[in-house]
Image (spheres, rainbow, N blue to C red):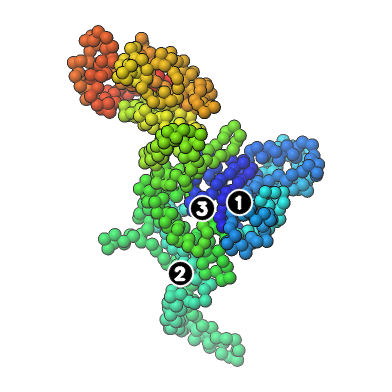
Amino acid sequence: MKISKIKVNNYRLLKSFELEVEEKLSLIIGKNNTGKTSLFSVLSKFLNPSSRKGFLYNDFNTDFKKIVENSVINAEIEKEKWQDLMISMLVYIDYEENDNLENISELILNLDPTDHTLILSFEYFLNYDSYLRLRKDFAGFKSDKLPERGFDFFLNKNVASYFKKRNRVLESGNETNSIEIDDIRVRRIINIQTISAKRDIDNEGSNSESGRALSRFSAEFYKSRGSVNTIDLSDFQKKLLETDKTFNDIYKVIFKPVTDNIKKFASHGSTEPLLEIISNLQEEKLLNDNTSVIYNQDGHTLPEDYNGLGYLNLFAIIYCIHIKLDLLKKHGIVNEKPSDINLLFIEEPEAHTHPQLQYAFIRNIKEMLEQESKGIVLHTIISTHSSHIVSQSEFDDIKYFYRDFKDNNILVRNLSELQKIYMNEESKEEDKTIQKKNFQFLKQYLTLEKAELFFADKAIFIEGDTERILMPAMMKKLDMEKSKEDSFIPLMSQNISIIEVGAYAHIFEHFLRFLGIKTLIITDIDSVNDSDTACPVCIGKKTSNASIKHFLEGKTLDNLKKLPKEEKILKFEGGKWVGDVNGHLRISFQTEQDSYHARSFEDSFIALNYDFINDNKAHFNGLKCRDDFDKGKYTEHPIYEITEKCIAKKTVFATDILYFSNDNMSNWSIPQYIKEGLEWLA
């Protein structure tokens, strides 16, 4: 028995949301405000019986708010046409015939022997009677009390008076057929425990409660073991009883003056029992008040709050996981069995931790959960903003959340789908071989190098080291040049990921479409002659650049030289990339500037900034043959020849440019093709 998917409707950002749940671990990733916290919240509110947070009007999706308001302020809906308005969460459970069906057998509504799906529906709903009452109450509110206040104000204060919670089982294949079930029955089928990102592990001082977080978790861990309800006394409890006896003898001596006087006062014909003072040590209170976690280093002990927040957070999560799993297992609770399915949600485990600890967490969490969850069916969901955690995760576990602004909704993409996209069944066998290699490269590159791309709002794909070193400087320079333009959003303030891919940007095309982020590809025109030998653009016959040939398929070198900048903006349509000014991808390469068409970045930069480099060439460590850095020495293609002869090390050359820049970088210029691309991206 397992959860196969979860659907949520009308809750915050989750307007019409669907998540496929992995059998063991689902890793949820995405940029800020893409519904990860909303999912955590709605699961807790519907499934966690200990959650004290009820639904609020602000939990309503904005479009759902409009639907509710319109139903109230417009003409009354007839009962025959009424459908309950609700926030809902549907949990799809798949079961097998050999599973223990004790808790669900009476809830199976579909009699088709091949259908093994149970649908649990959790709802916060407005029924017809409450709808009529809401209309009447709001009309009275508007006329009698605060006519200047609107519907949002009214329902924000009174939502719980009209909307109520209920649980139902829906028939698979016919969801109009249903039966209601109570919370107790739900808990037998599914149970949830959550570990919030707010774990209260501040180590500012040992006198604070948070300063002893691990000690507090130690007490909670003991409590979660449920030993109070076991028949056989634990070793710990036996020791407490022995200690009680010892303390009783000591108490008799300590309190003898008091008890002797009490006996005197009570001995005159009284039948009242005599007072005794005894020890009554309680294990839970003892652990709460007297348990300390310490660090032992070279024989010296230090309090727990002397360590960094990163380690505290990691250790706290491990404690919390043990505690939550014990609660799911219902350790030591008499006549209680674990639920059929158990869900553990861990929110942002990376808080306060440096990359090495994040790597350690994700590398070990699966094995730990496997070991500690024996005997129960456990699904674990982890949400994260950490590229370090993503880089160490299995591709098939990853769920990418992204926002559809047009429909005001959150969509989910499974990274396991990417391989299917790359391995299109309609492709030729030779193409499939290439695409398989492309996918393997992408998977390796993302996990080893640039998992940050998952969390970016925009991306820049660049050729090599020179652009990698100089791109942030060029972005900052453009920001300064555009600082007086109110409509320009500084590039350095945006969440832009810079990815170095050489001439392999085309391999990322399916992935970029998958993410749906605005992307700028900065590459070189790479002109070659008929023998495929590099040559100046003015005498070139074609381009050797794989990305240009892929994204601008069929374009000759002459076409590329004259291509308007609007036609470099692309969208994917009909199985190919086509020009569209509203597209999300732009490819930028060298264009003619000041009567010269460069072939590479270095070529274009030298052409545009010849005097800047020439004035400092004696100190440019990235140059060689400095005497040849002289336009007057060449009769043909001087800049091209200088670039070929005088660049010794591209990375050092790029560093030289930064070193000799003035404070506002006004002593050199950005090549036009890069500037146009950055302006588009901004």
Is residue 74 shown left or right of residue 202? Answer: right
Residue tagged by mark 3?
23
- For the N terminus, the image quarter is bottom right
Identified at 61% across, 62% down, the residue is 101
Amino acid of disc 1: Tyr
Amino acid of disc 3: Glu
User: Which of pointers 2 and 3 indicates the residue nearer the eye?
Assistant: 3
Q: In the figure, 92 relative to 266: above or below?
A: above
Q: Which of 497/109 is in front?
A: 109
Q: Position of residue 241 (x, y in %)?
A: 46, 79
Return the disc, 2 or 3, that comes first in the chain's sequence.
Answer: 3
Describe the element under mark 1 as helix, strand or loop.
strand
Q: Which of 441/65 is in front?
A: 441
Describe the element under mark 2 as helix, strand or loop.
helix
Q: Position of residue 287 (x, y in %)?
A: 45, 67
The label number, if any, that marks residue 92 in the structure image: 1
Describe the element under mark 3 as helix, strand or loop.
loop
Amino acid of disc 2: Leu
Is residue 259 shown left or right of residue 388? Answer: right
Categorize mark 2 by other alpha carbons within 10 Å: few (<14), some (14-19), many (20+): few
Q: Quadrant of residue 10?
A: top right
Q: In the figure, 424 relative to 467: above or below?
A: below
The label number, if any, that marks residue 597 in the structure image: none
Q: Which of 390/488 is in front?
A: 390
Q: Quadrant of residue 555?
A: top left
Is residue 336 shown left or right of residue 675? Answer: right
Residue tagged by mark 2?
286
